[in-house]
Amino acid sequence: MKLYPIQAGNFKLDGGAMFGVVPKPLWQRTNPADNNNMIDIAARCLLIEDGDRLILIDTGMGDKQDAKFFGYYYLWGDDTIDKSLATHGFHRDDITDVFMTHLHFDHCGGSVQWNKDKTGYETAFKNAHYWSNKDHWKWATEPNRRERASFLKENILPMEASGQLKFTGLPENKILKNSALGFDLFFADGHTDKQMIPMLQYKGKTICFMADLLPTAGHLPMPFVMGYDTRPLLTLDEKEVFLNMAADNNFYLFLEHDAHNEIITVKHTEKGVRLNETFTTNEIFI
């Protein structure tokens, strides 16, 4: 197995929304805001080369929305999925599987693109299976009013229409062992229903793709929960379970949204689970 970080493009989000009820003087120590109160956010995806499978976890926002939409997110940098794949010698047509941790637009928007004449939409990875789970798919396609703006039909429905959509199983408890993708999945319901956190075995290490269970290293303290989470008290419980497990077992946490920290480990302290070490993806993957 080989792992590659795939940069899908950087953006900014409101720091207050990213940290919920936590006062700004606390969260800006780790995630400094600009004059508009916006903080740096990455869309760091993960490519897994495993035998004849090439699995891409999450796909970022994509580029099919209009200028008004992207104006809310202050895009920065020039990273794209295509550039990042090419850096590692791959093309989007090589991808065999696209695994979506959940279907919010900043995680799956790049999964669907305009067709050639911009009269409709098509899947962006024509040779890939697209993976979600039945419960989250229903949640996303019949959205509640809180999340409706994050579940965009044009990002989601073309996956099903193409015939490329597949579903993982669902766990009896929180962890689905040895999923159809070959790795374990931790299911978390606080941010959105049935978000999936991949847990990969790689060179004797457990690599966890943290998605929105732990957006940045600054979210390590238990009460530091996003205002975007639909069930923040449940997020608190899920973070406690996962981060204690991570500290106990020295998991390596791959941070999708942290623009400045790629991979971290955590440890137990008197104040709870806190940052232990930071690593670049090159240090862990090569």
Image (cartoon, rainbow, N blue to C red):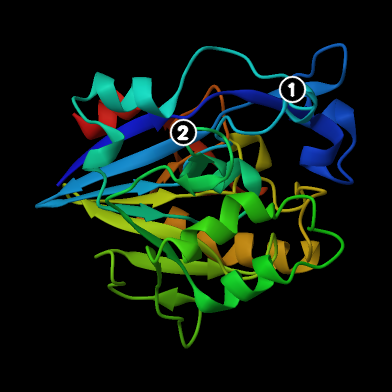
> How far apart are the alpha carbons under marks 2 and 1?
19 Å
Which residue shows up at 82% across the image and 30% down it? 14
Q: Locate residue 5: give its quadrant.
A: top left
Which mark is nearer the camera, 2 or 1?
2
Which residue shows up at 70% across the image and 65% down it? 190
Label located before the other in sequence (2 or 1): 1
Amino acid type assigned to the residue bearing label 1 in the image: Ala
Dot 1 crowding, Cα within 10 Å, few <14, some 14–19, many 20+: few
Relative side of 254 to 38, left or right = left
Q: Which residue is at the front of the view, 62 or 163?
A: 163
Amino acid type assigned to the residue bearing label 2 in the image: Lys
Contact flag, marks 2 and 1 (Cβ < 8 Å): no
Give x and y (percent) for residue 130.
39, 59
Give x and y (percent) for residue 269.
58, 47
**Which numbered disc covers residue 67?**
1
Q: As displayed, is residue 168 above or below residue 215? A: below
Give x and y (percent) for residue 71.
78, 22
Which residue is farthest bottom? 172
Give x and y (percent) for residue 179.
31, 72
Provide the secondary structure element on which disc 2 rests: loop
Q: Which residue is at the front of the view, 126 or 203?
A: 126
Provide the secondary structure element on which disc 1 rests: helix
Q: Which residue is at the front of the view, 114 or 44?
A: 114
Relative side of 86 to 73, left or right = left
**Which numbered disc covers residue 116?**
2
